[in-house]
Image (tube, helix red, strand yellow):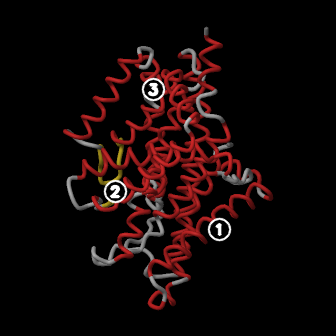
Amino acid sequence: MKNSNSEQNALLFDSRFISVIFFVCSIMVVGIHCYNAATLPPDDIVFYIEGFFCHGLFVAAVPIFFYLSGYLFFRNIQSITDVFKKMGTRAKSVLMPFLAWSTIYLLFYLVGSTVFSGMLNDPILLDPLSIIKYIVFYRYSFALWYMYQLMMYLLLTPIIFFVIKNRWVAVLLLVACFLFTVFVTDGIDFKAFNDIPRSVFQFNFFGYYLAGCISVKFAGEINKIKEFIFRNKKLSMIISTALLIMFSFLGALTFDRILPIIYDRIFVPLIAVFLFIFVGLIYEKIPYPKQVSTMIVYGVHTMVCVCMSYAYMPILPYVPKLVLFIIATAIGAVLSCLISYILKRFFKPIYYVLSGGR
């Protein structure tokens, strides 16, 4: 029975699909951080176009990251011993690159603030306690919040293991988590650096992670849904594309305009679901660069974006914002992938650390 469950869970999402959608989502994150339409009036067409992508389509990336992280952890887990073993391997694959990237960004801004005097508002303190604080609370790369949260969720995996033994208790916990974020709070924050908050625990994203953990217990039902979708592939493609566009557009319209619950709790999950289905229908046709680590693309892209922002500053007044957004996203994605490839090809020890050994 154990082997049967293990095989069923392993077949829930195949390795190529997982690699492709992780890669697609990492490129979307690059696009989010190239957004430049915040200063435009709400009736500007560029504001809506960039909003469609950065506040609509691309917001699916992080929920999918968390969902698949939860699924991949509990796939093939049979005992609490397996949980503790996998916690050890995940500690290496998440904690190691987190500390490495946080240190690199500290050095990057230390050098950058020396070259560009206006790069930072506050000077970097070089006493041991300040350095540890900068690294542990990822002071100079906010994008690392995702990895920080993932480490927090990993600490709960032994408890999650016992909870999801009963599928419906697990579902009730997921619903409770959802309601908690709606009516109580979506996270626990503290001010780590003056007025800059850091999240200790994000309940809303924990919900996505927990959904991934629970999905291994519903492998049979999920596989039936997959079979139905692929039996009706053309219709599924049309419906998923239409809904993905519609919810991405609605997400862009509601971002920061009406009750956050509509955006965060309804549109973002729906966009993630339909992007997941859309990629699932076409992933075999999407070229995936095997020599590129999603972890490195995610880690290096903000540094690349900062460098690009200084590089194109002289031409900023002469280039339309939408054109600049497209160019910046394309160049940022290509350079991030290229750096990942170069590290894997020529600097394997560095690649190993920055990719978490994946």
Q: Secondary structure at mark 2?
A: helix
Residue at left offset 50%, top offset 81%: 116
For marks 1 and 2, the one nearer the N-term is 2
Q: Which residue is mark 3?
A: 214
- Callout 3–callout 1 Cβ contact below 8 Å: no
For marks 3 and 1, the one nearer the N-term is 3
The quarter holding residue 168 reads: top left
Q: Position of residue 344 (x, y in %)?
A: 75, 54
Tally of numbered tags: 3
Q: Which residue is mark 2?
A: 251
Q: Which mark is residue 2?
A: none
Q: Callout 2, which amino acid?
A: Gly
Q: Is residue 4 left or right of residue 319?
A: right
Q: Secondary structure at mark 1?
A: helix
Q: Position of residue 316 (x, y in %)?
A: 47, 86
Dividing the image into 4 quarters, which one contains the C terminus? top right
Residue at left offset 34%, top offset 29%: 174
Q: Nearer the viewer, mark 2 or mark 3?
A: 2
Q: Nearer the viewer, mark 3 or mark 1?
A: 3
**Viewer-side residue, 80 vs 241:** 241
Q: Position of residue 117 (x, y in %)?
A: 46, 82
The quarter holding residue 155 reads: top left
Q: Which residue is mark 1?
A: 335
For marks 2 and 3, the one nearer the N-term is 3
Q: Callout 1, which amino acid?
A: Leu
